[in-house]
Image (cartoon, rainbow, N blue to C red):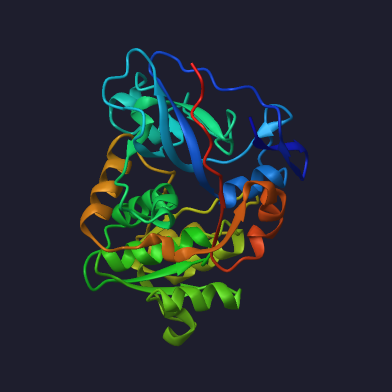
Amino acid sequence: MKAVALVSAGTVKVLEDRPEPSCGPGDVIVAVRGVGLCGSDLAVVGGRRPVPAFPWILGHEAFGVVLAAGRDVTDRRPGQRVVIEPNYPCLSCGPCRSGATAGCPDRRAAGITEPGLLAERVAVPAPFAWPVPESWDEADVICVEPLTVALNAVRMSGLGPGDDCLVLGAGSQGLLVVLAVLHAGGRPFVADPHGGRRDLALRLGARDAADAGPEASFPVVVETSGVPEAFEEAVRRTASGGALIVVGQSTRPARVPTFTLVQRRMTVRGCLIYDHPAGFARTIATLGVHDLRPGRVLRERFDLAQAPQAFARASAVAGKTWIGLPRTEEMSA
């Protein structure tokens, strides 16, 4: 079986002889059809997020078709098209029992803490393989996982119809936040030094933050870039009584005076992924009713054999990059 792996720091290869996945009693085997790339994947490849071992299978934003189901699985069946929720909480700790599964201390993350999904076939806990209609465009299906992050961030902010929102960073996650703000009835303004990313955000319906003026403040700010200087800018641009939602992550410290936070009575909240099962359930229900078309953020598609080039180019692309996998024959029993 073929899979895409990080074989050493910074080196991505397509491996030809990986073992077939084993289907546990509560698992499904999924033939992967496509995997999106995001900043977390690039951080792994770049060495900013160390991996447990080499070679390390990459990728976590995947969709495909169920090939087989374990003996205890009753609500998934071979032939179903599914999108994979790649974060597996323990479902028994305090945070999980309260519904805050993103805070699970034992949460397993595909491609980060355990081998990823960029392989021809993968085993997935059945509740984390979500059926989606065959009629949905594959570009939209690819974006379900990062769109769930974006919708969660906007929901956490308290943004309402007519509210202005500054989105700092117009990478793929920032672009999806723009769509989430528009879906909530808000007015997104975007700032990004990369002209191509900024232009794409404007085509999706955002406004240029430069048009609002350098001193303009916003009741809601979402920081997606993970650059400390951008976080400092986000604090400066958050209005009195406003909410700053932090999606981007960095290990470099930012310099922020507590005087500003207190005097402006700001709410600063980190947005770590989403909770299970509410996050994915909400996104899939939303896409079933509303014409968000998140696949509009996709800009480059690569075949499996081109995966090393896909990872090498992804950070420079204005929009999201993804890798399509060929259809394979069903596994023999």
Examine the rendered structure and indicate whether residue 259 appears above or below residue 270: below
Q: Which of the two residues, 210 or 133, is positioned nearer the viewer here?
A: 133
**Residue shown at 48%/29% (left/top)?**
330
Q: Return the x and y of residue 1 as percentages of the image width and height.
A: 63, 29
**Residue shown at 78%/43% (left/top)?**
11
**Residue shown at 50%/38% (left/top)?**
32
Q: Return the x and y of residue 30 as percentages of the image width and height.
A: 46, 31
Examine the rendered structure and indicate whether residue 237 appears above or below residue 209: above
Q: Return the x and y of residue 234 as percentages of the image width and height.
A: 48, 65
Examine the rendered structure and indicate whether residue 169 appears above or below residue 75: below
Q: Is residue 303 visible?
A: yes
Residue 277 left/right relative to 215? left
Q: Is residue 260 visible?
A: no
Q: Return the x and y of residue 63 as percentages of the image width and height.
A: 44, 42
Q: Which of the two residues, 113 or 154, is positioned nearer the viewer here?
A: 113
Examine the rendered structure and indicate whether residue 176 appears above or below residue 95: below
Quadrant of residue 232 in the image? bottom right
Q: How many marks?
A: 0
